[in-house]
Image (cartoon, rainbow, N blue to C red):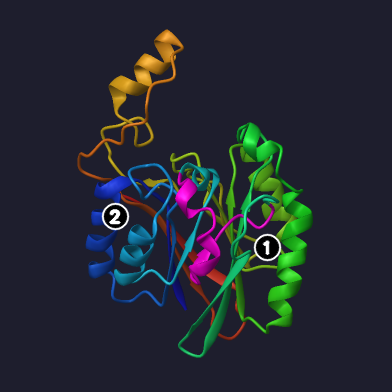
Amino acid sequence: MKVLIVGDIVGRTGINRLKEELNKRKDIDICIVNGENSASGRGIREKEYKEILSYGADAITMGNHMYYRKEMLSEYSKLSKLAIPANLTNLVGNKHVIINKNNIKIGVINLIGTFAMGDIIEKNVRNPFEVAIEEINKLNEEGVDYIFVDFHAEATAEKIAMAYYLKDKVNCVYGTHTHVQTSDETIIDNKMAYITDVGMTGPRDSVLGLKKEIAIARFTTGQYLHYECSDNEAQFNAIEVEFDDNTKKAIKINRINN
């Protein structure tokens, strides 16, 4: 089985680039996309949710930006392929998603980190390590064949610790959120795929997707300026992970940065 995991989609150019890339990649069995920035860099709406799925994604994960779309806070649970961070206590949604495809059941868990994620997160978050085990147990009861964990977190140490904590319990742990792809892709103990951050699929000429002039003004003046997503050509950040169909162990992980 070959799985494509796509880093944070940012804005219209990110969605367009996703469509372009998925049209090229016909040998992928499963595609998981982080879509928390797909609505102009500020959350996701049903429109972007449906569009991302229509291009070939099998599941969509989220993160801290889901709070930006207040009209969606009561709607997330209705989107069956959307996994919200399972350790948030003040949002209602799917704490995991199960993909049934090609006679294989894949469980997808989304978790959010506890360090430097903003006040609203820190006030409403449970320990991600504790919640990870709870969700893994639920998925195992469902009889899944594979489990993937999107850990949406700022701190690299927290992500790496999660990888080692879950190395005997899941098939892949990958980080999202920073929008900067790391070069530490690996297979831990010859079985579990890992990378600290998949990166960003969004406007290349930007500051993490934000217009450069706005980002610079924020840092130089200390003012909070309204978020405006850049709209130039998008980069594509992802990982491609291949598994042995018999042992379910990861046998290859490739980082994509183009």
How many dots with numbers?
2
According to the picture, the residue beneath numbered tag 2 turns out to be: 15
Q: Which of the marked residues, 2 or 1, is nearer the chain's N terminus?
A: 2
105, 49: nearer the viewer: 49
> Residue 231, relative to residue 110: is it above or below?
above
Q: Report the residue marked by disc 1.
A: 189
Q: Badge 1: few (under 14), some or many (20 or more) residues near its Cα, within 10 Å?
A: few
Is residue 191 toward the left or the right of residue 253 in the image? right
Residue kind at label 1, given as amino acid type: Asp
Q: Nearer the viewer, mark 2 or mark 1?
A: 2
Label 2 Cα neighbours within 10 Å, binned few <14 / some 14-19 / many ≥20: many
Q: Amino acid at mark 2?
A: Ile
Residue 59 spot, x, y in % from top left: 46, 68
In terms of image quadrants, where is residue 256? bottom left
Where in the figure is residue 162, as x and y percent of width and height?
A: 70, 51
Compared across the picture, whether 66 is left or right of 147 comes to left
Secondary structure beneath label 1: loop
Q: Is residue 185 left or right of residue 163?
A: left
- The picture places residue 167, in percent across and down from the top left corner, at 70, 62
Q: Secondary structure at mark 2?
A: helix
Label 2 close to label 1 by CB (< 8 Å): no
Which of the 4 quarters of the picture holds residue 169?
A: bottom right
Give the percent coordinates (x, y) of residue 8. 42, 49
State the residue at coordinates (23%, 55%): 16
Out of 2 and 229, give the one closest to the viewer: 229
Q: Quadrant of residue 250 in the image?
A: bottom right
